[in-house]
Image (cartoon, rainbow, N blue to C red):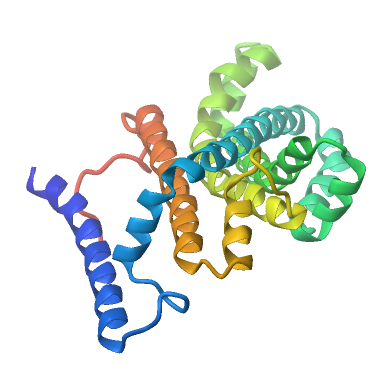
Amino acid sequence: MRKAVLRWLVPWASLMLALAAWEAVVRMQRIPPYILPAPTLVAATLWANLGSLLPSWWFTVKVTGLALLLAVAGGVLLAVLFAMSRWVERALYPFAVVLQVTPVIAIAPLILIYVDDTLAALLLCAWIVAFFPILVGTATGLKSADRNLRDLLRLYRASRWQTLCRLLVPSALPYFIAGLRVAGGLALIGAVVAEFTAGAAGRETGLASRILEASFRTEIPRMYAALVLVSLTGVLIHATLGLLARALLGRWHESETRPGDGL
């Protein structure tokens, strides 16, 4: 119980100390709000503008979630094809690498030109960013199955489908979860960056548009409030995927078992 309490207390205590130091510096140095607002002012601004920020937050969450689901579907399917056929991997893997190494902010304007629907364009940009970690993680996991177990299944004349379901998928699950946790944050980054590039405005837009509007009007506290919502969304995604990892791996895989405090 004591270890569990400390595990939760230490991060929250460090966060509170950082916010207190930020507040103290702003007050002692008398920094104007249009340069650096205090955390209390950011919190008050967030509360006052919550009604207008929540629809934009939900739009960003929707784009991020859909892009992540599409990345999971496409990444897992392609990784399975790679595991089943080396020729498919050699033919398609270079295209995946090109998508990964090309900055999304560089190709977002082209996507926005060729795709008429803004929501579809934002989804495509976020999907490109989130796709590669899932593909690489799952493909690496599928290739990391124990060779002795592969030989055993071959000895018992298991079909390729049986080998995939009973050996390769359980072996790949920790790698897939690791890629998913990376892709969750990248999907959010891709959605926000794509909307920055689009410069969209109106009611059906995300938090990036609210940040742009606040910066154009030099409403710095409101801009910080929108940034706080983006950061909290990323933390929520990370925590949710961490709970998923604990639920799927906590009973059997070393990455989620905690016999002691570690180093």
**Rendered view: 126 above or below 66:** below
Point out residue 138 in the picture as x, y percentages from the top left corner: 62, 37
Point out residue 31 in the picture as x, y percentages from the top left corner: 37, 83
Residue at the extreme left: 2
Which quadrant is home to the C terminus?
Answer: bottom left
Identify the residue shown where x is 62% and y is 59%. Answer: 213
Asked whether 98 or 164 is in front, the reply is 98
Identify the residue shown where x is 38% and y is 50%. Answer: 48
Identify the residue shown where x is 63% and y is 60%. Answer: 212
Asked whether 100 or 196 is in front, the reply is 196
Question: Where on the picture, by quarter, is residue 44?
Answer: bottom left
Question: Where on the picture, by quarter, is residue 120?
Answer: top right
Tell me how many marks there are. 0
**Rendered view: 158 above or below 31:** above
Residue at the extreme right: 114
Residue 165 shown left or right of residue 43 in the figure = right
Point out residue 23 in the picture as x, y percentages from the top left corner: 27, 74
Residue 107 shown left or right of residue 46 in the figure = right
Residue 24 shown left or right of residue 174 in the figure = left
**Rendered view: 183 above or below 45:** above
Identify the residue shown where x is 68% and y is 12%. Answer: 159
Which quadrant is home to the N terminus?
Answer: top left
Asked whether 153 or 78 is in front, the reply is 78
